[in-house]
Structure formats: C-alpha cells, structure tokens
Amino acid sequence: MKHILVIDDSATIRMSVEYALKEIGFPISQAENGRDALEKVNSIKSNGNDIAVCVVDVNMPEMDGITFVKEFRKGDKFTPVIMLTTESEDQKIKEGKDAGASGWLVKPFQPEQLVDVVKKLVR
Ligand SMILES: [Mg+2]
C-alpha cells in the first residue's frame, strides 16, 4: 500500500494538507521535520509498504526540507517529492530542484492546487 507523507513543522499545515489530500485515497502519514520523516519512510518501507508522494516544507527545525530531499533521494530516485515554499524562497526552489524535488507549491495555496499537483505526479 502506498502512503502519502506530509512533512511540516506546523501542525496546522499538516492537518490542512492531510484534509485536502484525503480524496486521493492513499493512507496519509505525518512528520514534523526531515529527520522524523526519514524515520517514517524507513518504517513504512520496512512494513512492506511504499511512499506515493512526499509533500515537504522547506523551513523546519532539526532537518530542513532541502536536506530531507537529499537524504531521501539517496535511497529513492523516483518517488515524487513536492516542496512547499513561500514567495521569498526562489533560491530554495532552485536548491530543492537540484536536490531532486519533483515540483513545488508556493504558500498560501488552494487545496485544489495541491490535489492537482499530487494527482499529476502519483500513478
Ligand atoms: Mg516550516
């Protein structure tokens, strides 16, 4: 079974992203930062499941989104990763792409925009 992994240090954003993505029909897991997310990836995969898509914030304590993407890509070249950025983070978008992110959304975004991007990337 494929899981959607939502990674953001804001509980409010995690909840709104989870709510928006419910209609896609995959189980959804949440992580508070990149390090927590890498642990969730490992436990999901070691249970014989897989990741459908990661939706990841850039600025987080402990491990930021760019570092997460780099670490995640060491073990997974193809699973899509969508970064959530803010208006002022042009440089972060470039860094994210270089690290292996598949797409990004600029906050604040409409739930339908997120659903569209996820549907395009998830098969
Ligand atoms: Mg943040």
Image (cartoon, helix red, strand yellow):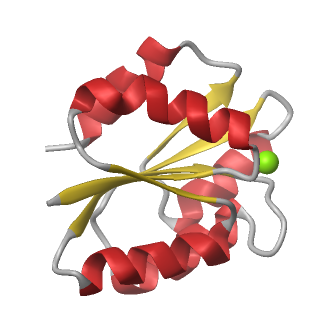
- Indicate left or right for 109 with 77 as reference: right
| Residue 6 % position (x, y) | 51, 50
Depth check: give the residue in front, 2 or 102.
Answer: 2
Q: Quadrant of the C terminus?
A: top left
Determine the image quadrant of residue 96.
Answer: bottom right
| Residue 1 % position (x, y) | 14, 60
Q: Report the label total.
A: 0
- Indicate left or right for 7 with 73 as reference: right
- Indicate left or right for 106 with 4 as reference: right
Up the image or down, 93 lies above or below 46; here it is: above
Up the image or down, 58 lies above or below 36; here it is: above
Q: Residue at x 84, y 66 (%)?
A: 61
| Residue 94 % position (x, y) | 66, 51
- Indicate left or right for 69 with 61 as reference: left
Up the image or down, 31 lies above or below 117; here it is: below
Determine the image quadrant of residue 41.
Answer: bottom left
Q: Residue at x 67, y 35 (%)?
A: 13
Q: Residue at x 43, y 85 (%)?
A: 74
